[in-house]
């Protein structure tokens, strides 16, 4: 708080206010001295002696303070006018100089401090104008002409010394000293004002240079950031393309793998039944044909929308049951399905993952494990959906994660889920999927 007050008191605007007050005091002092001198001569009947020392009749005593202070009031009002164009500011300076000349004329060209006030205002409002030098020279010339009494050669005015002749010698010395002190003080304040103004303008230039430097640095940072964003965008596009290719590969793998497994297993069964039971073979071949048609439909659908055709036509649970019925009829594999959780509130991405995990696990159990009995259990515990699938196939002591398991893990990771599997006794797959619809009615185990 104290620092802000100190900065405000040292500002050019504050010093300019001091200059205005000093000029007012000086003009009032001179005008009252001259008026008092005239009245004194009149009252003491020494007017003839006073007139003998001058070339023209002076103005009435009361007019000197009234006119000089009135003109100075107009100068102060003129200095308050701001936000002008360049030509408007030039006109303002010219009018100010004319008023300053008139004040000096009324006071006998004994004071030129108002011109310094006009010059201070000119320097303040013309920091970058092309008129700055011209106006400064013009104001300085007027100041010199008044201060050196050069105008007195062309204008017959009564000098201040004649008015001061009314007073005694010792009083004249005091009055002259006061005039010189006020005049010098006004000039010193003007110099202080100019120093502060120059300092402010230099500080403003430094601030502008600093801002330009910061702006350039910011632009460089923005350029680097844009390059990083462009690189990141390119990498994002490439990553998205890679993910889409992988996803498409997963969909085709799941669809074709499921259909081909059913067809291969069914054909192998037909080979065995062909001679012993021709009618049963025909029934089996019809089931295989239906699986092939459904597989072809799923492939076209997967390529088009990457979503199983069954999920487009029915809800998730019916789609699962249809898929398992088709696998039973085409492969003669016993598939037991147990579901204790509602499957009607999942989003499409969740339904896709659940469907593909069951489909892929059943396909792997038949293709690789040679299982003839598969148990599928789906349930909920707390806010997790659990999928447990086990078979009585050959199992595997050393599991080598292939395309199917890898893509099941990828699908689950998209839903923040997890996958576990074991091949010690048959093959067991357990998937856990977080349930987003946690506020729905729970069916916990």
Image: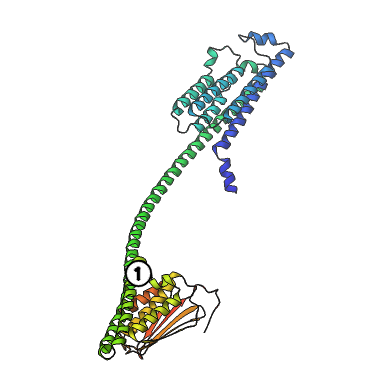
Q: Position of residue 98 (x, y in %)?
A: 55, 20
Q: Is residue 319 left or right of residue 49?
A: left
Q: Position of residue 247 (x, y in %)?
A: 34, 70
Q: Is residue 145 left or right of residue 27?
A: left
As rendered, which of 272 and 233 lies closer to the eye? 272
Residue 173 seen in this snapshot: no
Determine the residue positioned at 53% across, 81% down. 443
Task: Looking at this view, name the residue that lies furthest to the front.
Answer: 279
As rendered, which of 369 and 110 lies closer to the eye? 369
Residue 282 seen in this snapshot: yes
- Above or below, 361 relative to 159: below
Q: Which residue is mark 1?
A: 302
Near mark 1 (Cα within 10 A), the count class, few <14, some 14-19 or many ≥20, is many
Task: Looking at this view, name the residue that lies furthest to the right.
Answer: 43
As rendered, which of 285 and 221 lies closer to the eye? 285
Element marked by disc 1: helix
Determine the residue positioned at 28% across, 87% down. 278
Q: Is residue 273 left or right of residue 309?
A: left
Query: Quarter-wise, where is residue 133 in the image?
Result: top left
Q: Position of residue 46 (x, y in %)?
A: 70, 11
- Above or below, 157 relative to 429: above
Q: Position of residue 9 (x, y in %)?
A: 58, 41
Query: Quarter-wise, where is residue 108 in the image?
Result: top right
Report how many numbered discs are placed on residues in the image. 1
As rendered, which of 365 and 264 lies closer to the eye? 264
- Above or below, 393 relative to 130: below
């Amino acid at each position: 708080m104290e620092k802000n007050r100190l900065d405000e008191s040292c500002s050019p605007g504050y010093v300019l206010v001091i200059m205005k007050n000093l000029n007012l005091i000086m003009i009032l002092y001179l005008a009252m001295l001259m008026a008092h001198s005239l009245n004194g001569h009149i009252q003491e009947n020494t007017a003839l002696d006073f007139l003998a020392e001058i070339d023209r009749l002076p103005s009435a005593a009361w007019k000197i303070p009234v006119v000089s202070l009135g003109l100075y009031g107009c100068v102060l009002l003129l200095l308050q006018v701001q936000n002008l164009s360049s030509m408007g500011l030039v006109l303002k300076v010219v009018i100010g100089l004319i008023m300053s000349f008139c004040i000096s004329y009324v006071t006998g060209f004994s004071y030129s401090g108002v011109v310094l006030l006009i010059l201070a205002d000119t320097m303040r409002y013309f920091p970058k104008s092309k008129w700055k030098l011209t106006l400064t020279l013009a104001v300085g010339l007027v100041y010199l002409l008044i201060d050196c009494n050069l105008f007195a050669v062309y204008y017959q005015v009564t000098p201040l010394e004649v008015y001061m002749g009314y007073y005694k010698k010792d009083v004249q010395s005091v009055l002259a000293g006061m005039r010189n002190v006020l005049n010098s003080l006004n000039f010193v304040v003007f110099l202080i004002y100019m120093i502060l103004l120059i300092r402010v303008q230099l500080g403003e230039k430094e601030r502008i240079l600093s801002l330009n430097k910061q702006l350039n640095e910011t632009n460089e940072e923005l350029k680097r950031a844009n390059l990083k964003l462009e690189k990141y965008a390119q990498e994002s596009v490439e990553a998205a393309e890679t993910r889409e290719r992988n996803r498409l590969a997963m969909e085709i793998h799941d669809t074709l793998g499921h259909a081909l497994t059913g067809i291969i297993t069914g054909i192998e069964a037909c080979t065995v039944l062909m001679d012993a039971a021709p009618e049963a073979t025909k029934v089996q071949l019809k089931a295989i044909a239906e699986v092939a048609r459904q597989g072809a439909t799923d492939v076209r659908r997967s390529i088009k929308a990457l979503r199983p055709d069954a999920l487009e036509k029915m809800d998730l649970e019916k789609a699962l049951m249809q898929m398992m019925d088709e696998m039973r009829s085409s492969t003669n594999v016993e598939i037991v399905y147990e579901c204790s959780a509602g499957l009607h509130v999942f989003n499409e991405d969740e339904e896709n993952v659940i469907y593909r995990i069951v489909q892929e696990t059943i396909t792997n159990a038949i293709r690789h494990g040679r299982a003839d009995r598969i148990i599928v259990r789906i349930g909920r515990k707390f806010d997790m959906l659990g999928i447990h699938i086990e078979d009585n196939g050959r199992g595997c002591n050393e599991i080598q994660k292939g395309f199917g398991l890898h893509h099941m893990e990828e699908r689950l990771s998209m839903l923040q889920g997890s996958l576990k599997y074991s091949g010690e006794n048959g093959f067991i797959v357990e998937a856990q999927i977080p349930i987003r619809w946690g506020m729905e009615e729970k069916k916990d185990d």
